[in-house]
Amino acid sequence: MAAGRTPVLVGPTAVGKTAVAMALAAHWPLEVISADSRQVYRGLDVGTAKPTRRERALVPHHGLDLVAPGERYSAGRFARDAEGWVADVRARGRMPVVVGGTGLYVRALSEGLFVEPPIDGWRRHALERWTAELEAHELVRWAARLDPGFHGGGRQRAARAVELALLTGHPLSHWQRIARQQAAVQPWYVRLTVPRQVLHQRIRRRALQPVQHGVRTPAQAISRYDWNRRAVRAHRHNHQ
């Protein structure tokens, strides 16, 4: 691993990221930085695969049980908090390992967050009317001409690329490059995979765990919370 880089374990739900981190901890002095947007909420243990008390006792974990379900916790806030956790772990002579569960959180930490410069509202509105009249293929062609770093995507992504290039004088790839340079960590990605059939079996077992522990559905475990709250909505949608 390159010096100064931080291992980031990524992969689909139930692929075994936490298990791999625990296995690595048996050989190296490491601490886990959880990048899961649902595990930051206290009380949402059912269905989120939050590390057990035993796992946390064996290996220090950061990023768990930070806020109540009614509070807002953004990717930007996670990146700022995680930057501090990574620095503290390294100061203790240990290795931070990011265990990814939410792509936006991982990107905020390892690629930085793009902060849009001030843009004149009238000019933006006029440009939006113009791009709305273009056919999708024309819009994509404009995006590719204006931004050499544009590698395709849907209409919305292309319109965004055109907008930033024309209204800021710099393409989106330029702003993203600046964000990466200011990112909290330099990632060393480790992508975990298993055969599709095995993954489906693991997901099914995870979905059945609440039933086996006497909870009919994950929703019942959080029924005391307001269903309109952000954390509860995300938790509910994950199981629909």
Image (cartoon, grey):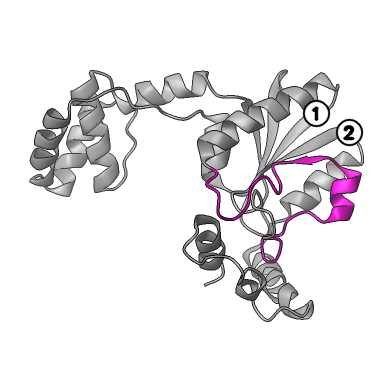
- Give 45 or 144, whichever is nearer the viewer: 45
Q: For residue 119: magenta?
A: no
Circle 2 — which element? loop
Picture layout, residue 52 above or below residue 181: below
Where residue 161 sits: x, y (%)? 27, 33
Answer few, some or many: residues within 10 Å of disc 2's Cα (few below 14, many 20 plus, some between 14 and 19).
Answer: few
Where residue 102 sits: x, y (%)? 57, 48
Separation (CA) of disc 2 from disc 1:
8 Å
Left/right of residue 50 with respect to residue 138 in the rendered view: right
Magenta stretch prevailing secondary structure: loop
Amino acid at circle 1: Met
Q: Name the residue under label 2.
A: 28
Q: Which residue is drawn at 79% across and 27% down?
A: 89
Amino acid at circle 2: Trp
Q: Which residue is drawn at 69% across and 42% down?
A: 63
Mark toward the start of the polypeptide (2 vs 1): 2
Left/right of residue 152 with respect to residue 5 in the rendered view: left
Q: For residue 71: magenta?
A: yes
- Give 96 or 158, whichever is nearer the viewer: 96
Where residue 146 sits: x, y (%)? 22, 26
Query: CB atoms at circles 2 and 1 under 8 Å apart?
Result: yes
Picture layout, residue 55 above or below residue 225: above
Q: Mark 1 points at which residue?
A: 95
Circle 1 — which element? strand
Give the residues drawn in magenta, as a range.
45-73
Asked where in the image residue 163 lies, by quadrant, the reply is top left
Q: Which residue is drawn at 12% across and 46% down?
A: 132
Answer few, some or many: residues within 10 Å of disc 1's Cα (few below 14, many 20 plus, some between 14 and 19).
Answer: many
Quadrant in which the N terminus appears: top right
Picture layout, residue 118 above or below residue 203: above
